[in-house]
Amino acid sequence: VQLQASGGGSVQPGGSLRLSCVASGFNFRINTMGWYRQAPGKQRELVATITSGGDTNYADSVKGRFTASRNNAKNTMYLQMNSLKPEDTAVYYCNLQLRGSNYWGQGTQVTVSS
């Protein structure tokens, strides 16, 4: 299993970013995927999940601002992040839970600061 996240960067509050996660080594199209984030000094937290059929769930802190999506033909998952806030600053990870194991991408840094 390989998960390659990209798209992070530095933006001002109110700005937008789109993260991507390219997956390989497993049957992407049938698996639920997740986005997590970890801010300095804090525990990693769930941001969003997306099922194989595209059903999504979000943490309360990002509802209405973030949108998870996927392209099964490209083995790629996305996280569109709008109206970014300083508290969204974190390393963002894509995640797969498969057969009792947790798989993580390398993470991509998102910094929201004026």
Image: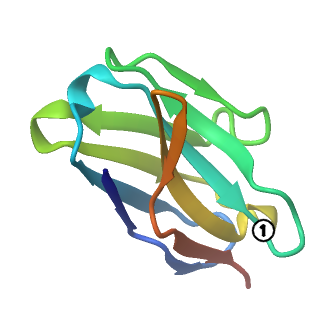
Q: Is residue 59 left or right of 93 when viewed as pictured? A: right
- How many numbered marks have been drawn onto this rendered protein structure? 1
Please name the residue shown 10% across and 35% down the image: 73
Query: Given the current orientation, which residue lies at the most extreme right position?
Result: 41
Residue under the image location 73 percent in, 85 percent down: 114
25 over 33 or under it: above or below: below
Q: Position of residue 46 (x, y in %)?
A: 69, 41
Q: Nearer the viewer, residue 18 or 15?
A: 18
| Residue placed most toward the observer, 94 or 109 | 94
Residue 91 on image: x %, y %: 63, 69
Q: Position of residue 111 (x, y in %)?
A: 65, 78
Tell me: 88 left or right of 55.
right
Instruction: Give residue 16's position: percent from left, percent from top.
Output: 51, 62
Q: Residues within 10 Å of mark 1 (few under 14, many from 20)?
A: some
Question: Image point 75% across, 55% down: which residue?
Answer: 44
Name the foreground residue: 29 vs 86: 29
Circle 1: element type: loop
Residue drawn where x is 41% and y is 58% of the image: 18
Which residue is the extreme one toward the front? 100
What kind of residue is marked 1? Ala
Viewed as shown, does residue 62 lie left or right of 33? right
What is the residue that sits farthest to the left in this orientation? 73
57 to 112, vertically: above or below: above
Residue 98 falls in which quadrant of the image?
top left
Question: In the rendered view, does 75 fall on the left or right side of 3?
Answer: left
Q: How is the image coloured?
A: rainbow
Provide the residue designation for mark 1. Answer: 39
